[in-house]
């Protein structure tokens, strides 16, 4: 779920004494935009495009202020501007962050605590958008069916970054004005016109090639800010007749309100399609105050709407956490009319209280305005207030994990509990591992990349995806190729390799099963498979290991992966055996979250509902040259039941991946079966 951004209002004086140039219709525009954001999120499950309108308004108001300073010959005093801005922004942010942490402790499953704690830092320091951009293209990022209660901070992070960048660009304008003796507005047009063209070009390209990442990328959003800056320059030259201004206002308002339904904002933005809400908002600003009884500004300057605009920043901050915490608490994915109305009412109440008792007092604090260091102290106090509980919480979780790890050999045998002669010596009531707050460490891995090897992959395509063990004097080389389901077996392979002094190399691409190139693969996967197979034939390792079958969550029918027999045939020509590990059973729900909510017994499944008959599958593999089946299913699903917990260790990380802890506990039996197949 993607969220939208809300700018803080530039107008800071009571409406009875507005600042010069204050435009009430812009404040009303902001209020309607935040209502769009809130209602679209709560009732329609869509993104409205309000993010783009807020970016434009933010740059529009900021530009008015800086252009006036430049034209009046006043110093920009960027340090004071930044301190004033973040002194105004952070207090409300801290109140929301602390409230979310408290609600997380009360209502959110432990499996999501680490994610929310991590996002507390990225939200507080305005890099949430980059964290989400990285996760959006990370195959191994935590899969959450319900978004984080702090996810909406991505847009505030973009805004915070621009609040730093834009004044620097105006400082550049000042240098150009002084050095080249050109008018201020011409220099502004030069600098921000270049930003507009460069950013829009990049935005169109990245949206087309990698839209999910582009959505969060600050660089793809800069042109929207530049649009607002250029609008300031254009307004004096756009003098329209009254009737045309009335029409422009209503056309802009209609386009603004309907864009979220007409366009796929989440899937198409922020490329050129984002011009829709920007042009809509520009038409409303261009229409201005028409003085006509039929103008859209009559609605936009309505006093209740202006008041809502005054607390729009706080409303944006609150509505999303309230919505997400409610969904988590009730175990739902959407809300109805009654629940949605209650969420809006609560969000409005919290927004009002935050605006009245936090925003306004902090903004009016003359003590902090008199000296820069005092404003810096306020900012530092805000950061400490939010950081202290996050540090303490994360430290407590790490200490808890370390204490459990110290007794894991005794209390958490995992698959070792299934071995003949096992004697249970665990403490009564010993906790299950891994802790749900330590899931980020449950992706199996090796020591590092492969760059230290003389025979490492040369192509960048493979070099960037190669990890290996630290082995200077090794006996044999095992090459692992495939996706995350191949990677998870590194938890079993690594202890075996350390015990027997093997070198292990792993070529991995998330979501890409290994086999000879097939038309069904997407292009990147086809190229990876071609390069990996070519490298395996050149390297001639002692064995290649890959996932041999493809299981499905909704059908008990796992089959040999297409293309794998052809790859086995080619490897046979180099006398390199190919071991195909049988895919583990998959579920249609997150097993770990189910266990947290309902207990392990309610989250198990019969093996016969998940995989094909083992005997018939073994026959299929016997008919394939040089391809042997390594089947660990009876260890994953002992007694033909796929259970979330075995030997006091969680088996599943999510709905289809094994935890590294359980994979490691299978290493003894994995070692025995692997060597029985390769004959070493």
Image (cartoon, helix red, strand yellow):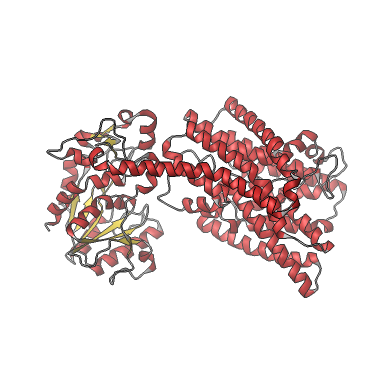
Q: Nearer the viewer, residue 94 or 275?
A: 94
State which quarter of the image contains the C terminus: bottom left
- Dividing the picture into quarters, in which one does residue 310 lie? top right
Give the answer, above or below, for where 327 lies relative to 559.
above
- Looking at the image, can residue 588 be seen? no
Give the answer, above or below, for where 578 lies relative to 115.
below
Q: In the image, what residue occupies the spot 38% across and 63% down?
A: 464
Q: In the image, what residue occupies the spot 74% across and 44% down?
A: 365
Image x and y of residue 284, in percent:
77, 46
- Looking at the image, can residue 167 be seen? yes
Q: Nearer the viewer, residue 351 or 76?
A: 76
Q: Count up the numbered dots.
A: 0
The residue lying furthest to the bottom in this view is 180
The residue lying furthest to the top in this view is 338
Image x and y of residue 168, in percent:
68, 63
Q: In the image, what residue occupies the spot 23% across and 39% down?
A: 410
Q: Is residue 429 left or right of residue 101?
A: left
Q: In the image, what residue occupies the spot 21% across and 34% down?
A: 640
Image x and y of residue 620, in percent:
18, 48
Q: Nearer the viewer, residue 451 or 536?
A: 451
- Dividing the picture into quarters, in which one does residue 494 lie? bottom left
Q: Is residue 285 left or right of residue 82?
A: right
Image x and y of residue 346, in percent:
62, 29
Q: Nearer the viewer, residue 277 or 343?
A: 343
Q: Is residue 75 left or right of residue 582?
A: right
- Dividing the picture into quarters, in which one does residue 353 lie? top right
């Amino acid at each position: 779920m993607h969220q939208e951004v809300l700018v803080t209002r530039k107008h800071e004086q009571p409406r009875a004494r507005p600042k010069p140039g204050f435009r009430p219709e812009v404040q009303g525009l902001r209020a309607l935009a935040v209502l769009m954001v809130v209602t679209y999120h709560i009732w329609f499950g869509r993104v409205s495009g309000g993010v783009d309108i807020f970016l434009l308004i933010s740059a529009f108001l900021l530009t008015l202020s800086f252009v006036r300073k430049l034209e009046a010959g006043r110093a920009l005093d960027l340090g004071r501007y930044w301190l004033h801005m973040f002194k105004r922004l952070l207090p409300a942010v801290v109140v929301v962050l602390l409230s979310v942490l408290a609600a997380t402790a009360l209502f959110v499953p432990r499996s999501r605590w680490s994610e929310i704690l991590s996002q507390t830092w990225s939200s507080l320091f305005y890099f949430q958008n980059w964290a989400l951009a990285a996760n959006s293209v990370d195959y191994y990022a935590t899969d959450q069916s319900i978004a984080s209660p702090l996810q909406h901070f991505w847009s505030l992070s973009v805004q915070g970054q621009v609040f730093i960048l834009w004044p620097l660009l105006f400082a550049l304008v000042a240098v150009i004005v002084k050095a080249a003796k050109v008018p201020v507005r011409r220099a502004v047009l030069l600098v921000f016109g270049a930003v507009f063209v460069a950013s829009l070009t990049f935005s169109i390209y990245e949206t087309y090639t990698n839209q999910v990442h582009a959505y969060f990328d600050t660089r793809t959003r800069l042109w929207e800010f530049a649009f607002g800056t250029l609008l300031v320059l254009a307004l004096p030259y756009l003098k329209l007749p009254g009737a045309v201004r009335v029409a422009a206002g209503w056309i802009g308002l209609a386009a603004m309100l309907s864009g979220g339904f007409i366009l796929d904002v989440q899937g198409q933005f922020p490329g050129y399609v984002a011009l829709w809400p920007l042009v809509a908002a520009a038409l409303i600003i261009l229409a201005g105050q028409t003085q006509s009884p039929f103008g859209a500004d009559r609605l936009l300057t309505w006093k209740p709407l202006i008041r809502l605009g005054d607390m729009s920043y706080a409303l944006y901050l609150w509505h999303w956490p309230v919505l997400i915490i409610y969904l988590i608490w009730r175990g739902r994915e959407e809300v109805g009319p009654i629940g949605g109305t209650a969420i809006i009412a609560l969000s409005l109440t919290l927004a009002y209280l935050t605006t009245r008792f936090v925003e306004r007092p902090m903004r009016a604090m003359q003590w902090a305005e008199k000296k820069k260091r005092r404003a810096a102290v306020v900012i530092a106090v805000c950061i400490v207030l939010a950081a202290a509980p996050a540090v303490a919480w994360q430290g407590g979780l790490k200490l808890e994990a370390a204490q459990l790890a110290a007794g894991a050999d005794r209390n958490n045998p995992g698959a070792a509990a299934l071995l003949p002669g096992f004697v249970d010596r665990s403490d009564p009531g010993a906790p299950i591992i891994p802790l749900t707050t330590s899931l980020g460490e449950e992706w199996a891995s090796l020591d590092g990349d492969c760059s230290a090897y003389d025979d490492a992959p040369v192509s960048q395509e493979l070099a960037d995806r190669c990890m290996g063990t630290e082995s200077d004097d090794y006996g044999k080389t095992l090459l692992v190729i495939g996706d995350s389901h191949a990677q998870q077996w590194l938890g079993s392979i690594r202890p075996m390799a350390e015990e027997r002094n093997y070198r292990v190399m792993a070529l991995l691409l998330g979501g890409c099963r290994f086999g000879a190139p097939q038309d069904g693969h997407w292009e990147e996967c086809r190229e990876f498979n071609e390069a990996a197979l070519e490298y395996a034939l050149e390297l001639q390792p002692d064995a290649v290991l890959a996932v041999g079958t493809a299981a499905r969550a909704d059908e008990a029918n796992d089959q040999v992966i297409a293309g794998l027999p052809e790859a086995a045939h080619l490897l046979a020509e180099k006398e390199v055996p190919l071991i195909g590990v049988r895919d583990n059973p998959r579920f249609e729900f997150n097993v770990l979250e189910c266990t947290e909510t309902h207990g392990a017994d309610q989250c198990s499944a019969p093996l016969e509902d998940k995989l094909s008959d083992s005997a018939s599958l073994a026959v299929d593999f016997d008919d394939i040259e040089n391809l042997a089946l390594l089947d660990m299913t009876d260890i994953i699903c002992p007694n033909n039941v796929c259970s979330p917990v075995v030997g006091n260790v969680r088996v599943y990380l999510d709905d289809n991946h094994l935890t590294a802890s359980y994979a490691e506990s299978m290493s003894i039996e994995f070692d025995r079966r692997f060597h029985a197949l390769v004959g070493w």
